[in-house]
Amino acid sequence: MAQAEPRSVVIIGGGIVGCTTAYYLTHHPSFISSRTQVTLLEASAHGAAQGASGKAGGLVARWAYPQPLVDVSFDEHVRLAELHGGPDRWGWRYVGCGSWEGRAEAVPETPPEENGADGEADSLSGRRKSLEKTLGLEGGKPPKKKTKKATGLPSDLTWMAEDLTDAYSPMAPHGDTAQVHPYFFTTSMLAFAQEKGAEFTQGKATRIVIEDGGVTGVEYCDPSTQSEQHLLPATHVILATGAWASTLLPALPVTGTRAHSITIRPPKHHLPLAPYVLFTEITLPRDVGRGTRRRGTTHASPEIYARPGPDGEVYACGPGDDAPLPPCVDDVVVDQEACDNVWRQVRGVSRVLRAGRVHRRQACYLPTVLGSRAGPIVGDARQVARGLVVAVGHTCWGISNAPGTARAISELVMEGEIRCADLRSLQPSLFF
Ligand SMILES: Cc1cc2nc3c(=O)[nH]c(=O)nc-3n(C[C@H](O)[C@H](O)[C@H](O)COP(=O)(O)OP(=O)(O)OC[C@H]3O[C@@H](n4cnc5c(N)ncnc54)[C@H](O)[C@@H]3O)c2cc1C
């Protein structure tokens, strides 16, 4: 019997979706026998995971959405962590996750921190948007109010001020919520794929080449010269460009919402911090301000994540805004004031974190799906071209849902159909 033609798969985008897809393709049982070649093309001059996939919180949840993808993804996260030493390599662990409601106290300003700023200051733009993680829970309910003596605050959650807590309630049973450090997870997936032969190419894709109804390659420009065009021949093209999806395929209803985050290093004598991720609802005193005004008071809802590791890093992110998507991930502008606001809010509710220092101030674009149908958009886009596969629009759950997405896409490319889950509700033809 004649051997099938070798496949040349080009993945566009080195975020968690692209890198994890490279991992699953190169670890597929028929990867070697099928003589498949995998190339990952990433626009950033700084390597993989420079966008949302390196700057997200890293929550992994059984209560995320959409369910068919969650069912595969959570178990795959567990398997990958066991197989590759996830706790040491990317900070995999189970966490307590709860909604915390309370008041911030006004705290005097501290001098500028140890500062890993990732960009230049600019003015804070526009409306604030929720990142919508709690939509997966029934109605995203607020915590039940309790008496002051019985706020429900777990006894080991000592890094939040008890006297400023009004109510705490767990959001999911133990074992249903975990975390990863998204940068280390993503770059580990890429490294494992490279060990099996995947190529990493730095360059910005400018066109998916389609001939006779099928993909034949990807044109890209080298970031060092900008002008020079190169061609990567391809039998399959996987579009995994996150918020930038519509720049190559304008029909895709995907855009981006900018969100800021900071990382804080608490004083060493407070470490280790108990492993919790908190969805907060903070009432701010006037001078902590800059939240959303509601019924005469000002509120803010930063998410706060304790992370493992020797520095005991804590991550906190604020709401989204309307800043337009820049041409490249390396051009994302960090608004220092938006980062300052998150820091003021966190300092107002945690005396432990207040004694620490801000290590990083950063911004990234959450991929969002426009229209009434919820994303992500995952599957065969043969209505555009044979061999074109789409894996974009992962909204606030791309870290959690990347392994299920990647496994499904690897099955589609290597076996001709998705077997691990019923993802018909996410198929591209329903979106464009
Ligand atoms: C503040 C914040 C917190 C979050 N927290 C969580 C969380 O706790 N848990 C969770 O599950 N999810 C979380 N998310 C969501 C998650 O980060 C995203 O869904 C996920 O990172 C999307 O991954 P991606 O690979 O699709 O996109 P990205 O990470 O944006 O990667 C896309 C890549 O494509 C590249 N690219 C774009 N265009 C081109 C081109 N033309 N040529 C070559 N390369 C190109 C970009 O440079 C980029 O590296 C959070 C998001 C934000 C903003």
Image (cartoon, rainbow, N blue to C red):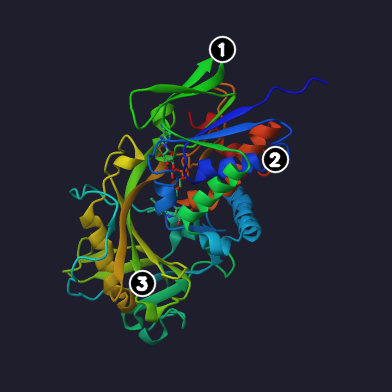
Q: In this rendering, is residue 256 above or below 233?
A: below
Q: Residue furthest right?
A: 1
Distance between the alpha carbons at the discs numbered 3 and 1: 58 Å
Query: Residue drawn 35% across and 73% down?
Result: 266
- Residue 56 rendering spot, x and y as whole percentages: 42, 54
Name the kind of residue labelled 2 in the image. Arg
Q: Nearer the viewer, residue 143 or 60?
A: 60
- Discs 3/1, front: 1
Could you tell me residue 178's position as x and y percent? Answer: 54, 63
Which picture quadrant has residue 254? top left
Location of residue 416 (image quadrant): top right
The residue sitting at 47% across, 68% down in the picture is: 309
Q: Quadrant of ligand 1?
A: top left
Residue annotated with mark 1: 212
Which of disc 2 and disc 3 is earlier in sequence? 3
Dot 3 corresponds to which residue?
Answer: 101
Per the image, label 2 sits on a secondary structure element best described as loop
* Residue 65 visible in the snapshot: no
In the image shown, does 126 or 51 lie closer to the viewer? 51
User: Which circle marks residue 419 in the picture?
Assistant: 2
Q: Secondary structure at mark 1?
A: loop
Under mark 1, the amino acid is: Asp
Q: Is residue 110 left or right of residue 71?
A: left
